[in-house]
Image: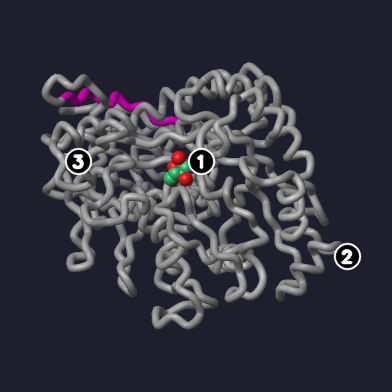
Amino acid sequence: MTLKGILNADIGRGTIDRNIYGHFSEHLGRCIYEGIWVGEDSAIPNTNGIRNDVVNALRQIKIPVLRWPGGCFADEYHWMDGIGPRESRKRMINTHWGGVVENNHFGTHEFMELCRQLECEPYINGNVGSGTVQEMSEWVEYLTFQGESPMSALRTANGHAEAWKVKYFGVGNENWGCGGNMRPEYYADLYRQYQTYVRNYDGNQIHRIACGPNGDDYNWMEVLMREAHRFMDSITVHYYTVPGLWENKGAATGFTEAEWFETLRKTLFMDELITRHSAIMDQFDPSKRIGLIVDEWGTWYDVEPGTVPGFLYQQNTLRDALVAGINFNIFHKHNERVRMANIAQTINVLQAVILTEGDQMILTPTYHVFDMYKVHQDAERIDLTLDGGAYSFEGQGEIPAVTSTASKDGAGKIHISLCHLNHLASAEVSIDLRGLASESLSVTGTTITADKIDAHNTFAKPDNVKPIAFTEFSIKDGVLTVSLPAMSVTTLALA
Ligand code: AHR
């Protein structure tokens, strides 16, 4: 298959917000406890209780923003249970996720310390479903108020005299479901009320985030925008890629070729979803002041056999690498509206970038795609049109064989990323390079691929799937020709 495209290097399409490469970490399974927090007395090397290997790996991919404490957990979380001496913190039941005891050892101070170590923006999700306006208001005061006040005094007594800066604050999570089973009209009113008391203290400017729809619930988006758009800076959407049915989602490894195809077909729905939600947002916010945050995205499979069902632990294969790349290409395309996206979830849960087992840690194929795509963070998207070709499998419909994106960074370097979805054949892509001096260009490349659709990394073979240098390209007469391996994600740098 030969595909043709045009790159207009001098036609900019706006900035690709670095927050599109954001993460979500919930008190769920082994994400926070073991994945991040091991405690100061742990034999696992840590800094202030937070494991060093994980922090180093996340810093490498430049994680820009981290959402916490949930998820469904957020609307059951009472932040005051997670401050003060750890040994006397309240022990609660994590009802959503396995019914395990939550000892609250990882709370506000620990989360802010994690963000400090990661050098990322904290994104805190407040409790609307079972929390009060006062509780939310006091959390913001505790976090950000520097002067004399009850919450500032409490924070100082707990060892942190200096107020933190917190930019992103979510007012409830999935309030259409686990966050209170509300109707959009009711939540819109509550949103207006709660956000009133999310104050900007001492120059800290909070970006207020409203809970948006479940996938394609366009009515929820319309009601929220109509009733509350004046009071929000962003609104969220959650969409998971589930290859099968909710009751039988499909396995993370050992899946069929048909499931490979179906997973990629379903993840491509993200494009339609964003297009339609954006059209509704445009009616109420034509100037695009309000951002659309893809707050939870990624694959959701059946849990690994023998693991706790409520812990949502799943392996991560080359298929997940494709899902990540395809979604990034879609988010870039919608960069005017999509200003943040948070993969669910960072470690040991759903489409994780890192898996841990005791003191061991492995990087997943998804991690490697985050690493390969970090060059697009805060770069200018440039105009790349590509005939994506067609890929079909055993009568399951037709999807593009290749999806793509391109950007120019601050130093003028151009990056092109290409996802080749077809698992059976290679593809040749010819891109007409316009708006740049192609004679003097030097090109380098990286690709991630494998010989099996479910290739993955294990603790015994941590480097089974990883990016390798890519050289299957040439430039002649201003045309860049690339030979893409079957089922691969490739990034090229042109300088
Ligand atoms: O990411 C797992 C769960 O999925 C989150 O807690 C919830 O917001 C969503 O339903």
Q: Quadrant of residue 91?
A: bottom right
Spot occupied by residue 111 in the image (x, y as percentages of width and height)? 58, 63
Decide: few, some or many residues near mark 3? Use Cα within 10 Å; few <14, some 14-19, many ≥20: many
User: Label 2 CB, ligand 1: below 8 Å?
Assistant: no
Query: In front: mark 2 or mark 1?
Result: 2
* Left or right: residue 460 compared with residue 231: left
Q: Residue at x 52, y 23 (%)?
A: 277
Q: Which residue position holds label 2?
A: 148
Decide: few, some or many residues near mark 1? Use Cα within 10 Å; few <14, some 14-19, many ≥20: many
Spot occupied by residue 376 in the image (x, y as percentages of width and height)? 45, 46
- Amino acid marked by disc 1: Asp
* Left or right: residue 167 compared with residue 359: right
Q: State which tag comes first along the sequence, 2 or 1.
A: 2
Secondary structure type for disc 1: strand
Check residue 487 in the rendering and tell me which mark sits there, or answer none. 3
Compared to residue 4, the image places residue 130 above or below, namely below
Q: Which residue position holds label 1?
A: 295
**Which portion, as a residue range, is magenta?**
383-392
